[in-house]
Amino acid sequence: MDEVPPIAEFAKSQGIGYTMLSDPKGAINERLGIRDTQYPVGSSAFGVPRPTLYILDSSGRIRLLFQEPTFRTRPNLDAVIQDIRKLPL
């Protein structure tokens, strides 16, 4: 949701070497179907994504999907790890 300058500054200050995404209008979140729909157009939080975690296999296929109903909650990481361990990877 942030513009490029603060993301770039954060990445530099934290030594992040991977590409980070700037999506200030939430267009990608909308296309992926992960936008938190409780915030309407015009809201300062419009476009905020729901926390979503994809677990991919080595061929890039989505094997597990964890998604919360609102950006205010996060997937339970113990449950995520438990489910990952059940996968025949």
Image (cartoon, helix red, strand yellow):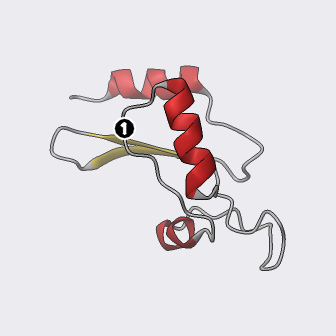
Q: The N terminus lies in which quarter of the figure?
A: bottom right
What residue is rendered at 57% in x and 40% in y? 9
| 32 shown above or below 80 | below
Q: In percent of the image, x 46 and y 25: which residue is there? A: 15
Residue 40 is situated, as x and y percent measured from the top left of the image, at 80, 76
Q: Where is residue 48 shown, x and y percent of the image?
A: 69, 59
- Can residue 14 be seen here? yes
- Could you tell me which residue is drawn at 17 percent across and 38 percent down? 58
Q: In the visual, does 52 lie left or right of 49?
A: left
The residue at the far right in this view is 43
- Residue 67 seen by the camera: no
Q: The C terminus lies in which quarter of the figure?
A: top left
Look at mark 1 in the image and give the residue it sits on.
Answer: 18
> How many dots with numbers?
1
In the rendered view, tell whether residue 13 sits above or below residue 40.
above
Q: Residue sitting at 56 percent across and 20 percent down?
A: 78
Q: In this view, does 63 lie to the left or right of 77?
A: left
- In the drawing, does residue 7 fall left or right of residue 61? right
Q: Is mark 1 on a helix, strand or loop?
A: loop
Front one among 17 and 87? 17
Q: Quadrant of residue 37?
A: bottom right
**Residue 85: horizontal and vertical position, in percent?**
36, 21
Q: What's the residue type where badge 1 is placed? A: Tyr
**Residue 10: x percent and y percent?**
58, 36
